[in-house]
Structure formats: C-alpha cells, structure tokens
Amino acid sequence: MTDPNLYFAMAGASLAGLGMVCMAALAGWRGWLALKERELHAFGEHAQADGPSLPNASARIEIADLKERIRKLEAIASGVDL
C-alpha cells in the first residue's frame, strides 16, 4: 500500500504541473510588460506630437485660484471695491 513509486509519480506530476503554471504566469507577465511598454511609447509619441501636455485638473484649479487672487490684488491696488 505504501508503494514508493506512487509517491515519486505524484511528486513528479506535481512538479511538472507547477512548472507549467509558472511558465504560463511568466508568459503572462512578459505580455503585460510588453503591453505597458507599448502604452508608454504611444503616450510619449502622442505627447511629443501635440506639444506639451495639458496640466492635470488640480494644477488647472490652482492656476485659476492664483489668477483670481491676482485679479483681487489688482482691484485693491487700483482702489476698486469688490
């Protein structure tokens, strides 16, 4: 009942299955990296073709806030009440 060949066969099959799963995971990982690399290259080419990229939303809000503060300071300097 405790045949050592059975244990060796099970261990071999398990090792082979683990190897196949690892190879599939490695192929998927390499594919994902290639996809991300293509996305980065496409984004870089797009940004170079269009010139400088637009600022993100928080930067635009901050710029609008600064413009509003400058407008208020100019109004104060010219003596206009807001």
Image: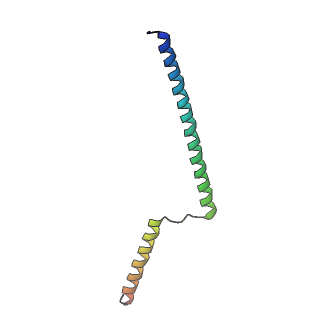
The image quarter containing residue 69 is bottom left
Q: Number of marks in the image?
A: 0
Image location of residue 48, percent across then percent down: 61, 60
Colouring chosen for the image of the structure: rainbow
Residue shown at the point (41%, 78%) measured from the top left: 68
Q: Nearer the viewer, residue 82 or 13?
A: 13
Residue shown at the point (58%, 36%) measured from the top left: 27
3 shown above or below 71: above
Q: Nearer the viewer, residue 54 or 80?
A: 54
80 shown above or below 56: below
Residue shown at the point (53%, 31%) measured from the top left: 21
Please state, as top left, top right, bottom left or bottom right, where the C terminus lies in the image.
Answer: bottom left
Residue shown at the point (49%, 64%) measured from the top left: 56
Please state, as top left, top right, bottom left or bottom right, where the N terminus lies in the image.
Answer: top left
The image quarter containing residue 76 is bottom left
Q: Nearer the viewer, residue 40 or 29?
A: 29
25 shown above or below 55: above
Image location of residue 25, percent across then percent down: 54, 35
Image location of residue 32, percent across then percent down: 56, 43
